Amino acid sequence: MRRCQPIGLFDSGVGGFTVAQEIFRQLPHEEILYYADTAHVPYGPRSVEELIRFATEITTFLVSQGAKMILVACNTSSSLALQILQERFHVPIVGVVDPGAQEAVKTTRNGRVGVLATEATIRKGAHGMRIQELDSSIQVYGQACPLYVPLVESGKYLSKEAEEASRLYLEPLMKASVDTIILGCTHYPYLEPSIRKIIGDAVHLIDPARQTVAQGKYLIENGIVPARDSRYGKPHHHFYVSGDLQSFRQVGGPLIGAPILQDLRQVSLDGILDGVAPQLISATA
């Protein structure tokens, strides 16, 4: 691998920015390639077959662009496709489910953990299975949140609608007396203000982004993945979307910083698994 290769990461939309920001904090010399599959967001209601195909297409693209490591910055994709991706591709691939589960096991004091996630992630039950592997005494309560991702993707994560949705989704978890809640979708940390209004400060919220990037950092610090040489200069990050470019920039700019999104391109991956080259539809710089 070359000393200038970037880290690839992907999500259905802007949720993976929580992971990207952790890369900026923990690995400030590294560059990222970020792919947002906004043409297919939200992922929650989609079939397993579709979601595995999307993840495989995106990973194929990121690897073709020189990514030295992939962070699957999406709990739904991590739940359903991580093992398949790890078996298919030659670069290290890290998901967000296991880091979140490990942190929840360390954090809970009463052995009752809630999971807020998309419908597909809750159906899979990946967080609960991993937590049970680590500590079979812990009870896990999953709650699907189909309104959360659309609220974030439309920029309404601080709205009255977000608070009403949080009240609906959190009521069963509060009745179950959970003391720890995993934010089982990378979009959900942006909804923390509305979530905190309902649960207060006593319940621990787990955002897996920090632990996920820490795993990637471990791979770099131990020479499994080469560190980017700072002599290549300031990192230049690249962002790609499958859907509308301007709406992504409008919503994503306030979340990650508009200047960071200067290199933003709309790229179609249709047919990439059959050898069709990615198609650049539009770009802004």
Image (tube, helix red, strand yellow):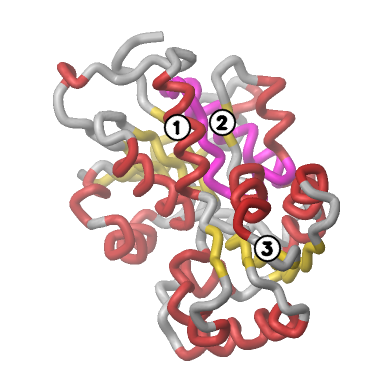
Q: Which residue is mark 2?
A: 59
Give the Cα separation between the discs numbered 2 and 1. Answer: 8 Å
The answer to which of 190 and 204 lies nearer the viewer is 204
Give the Cα separation between the discs numbered 3 and 2. Answer: 21 Å
Amino acid identity at mark 2: Thr
Mark 2 or mark 3, which is nearer the start of the sequence? 2
Q: Nearer the viewer, mark 2 or mark 1?
A: 1
The local secondary structure at tag 3 comes to loop
Q: Which mark is residue 118?
A: 3
The answer to which of 20 and 115 lies nearer the viewer is 115
The local secondary structure at tag 1 comes to strand
Amino acid identity at mark 1: Gly
Where is residue 116? Give x, y as percent.
66, 67
Where is residue 190? Give x, y as percent.
44, 68
Q: Which mark is residue 199?
A: none
Q: Residue at x 47, y 50 (%)?
A: 16
Task: Check the picture and name the quadrant holding the N terminus.
Answer: top left
Q: Is residue 227 left or right of residue 202?
A: left
Task: Check whether the beta carbons of the residues at disc 3 and disc 2 lie within 8 A of each other.
Answer: no
Q: Residues within 10 Å of mark 1 (few under 14, many from 20)?
A: many
Boundaries of the magenta span = 51-80
Q: Residue at x 45, y 32 (%)?
A: 8
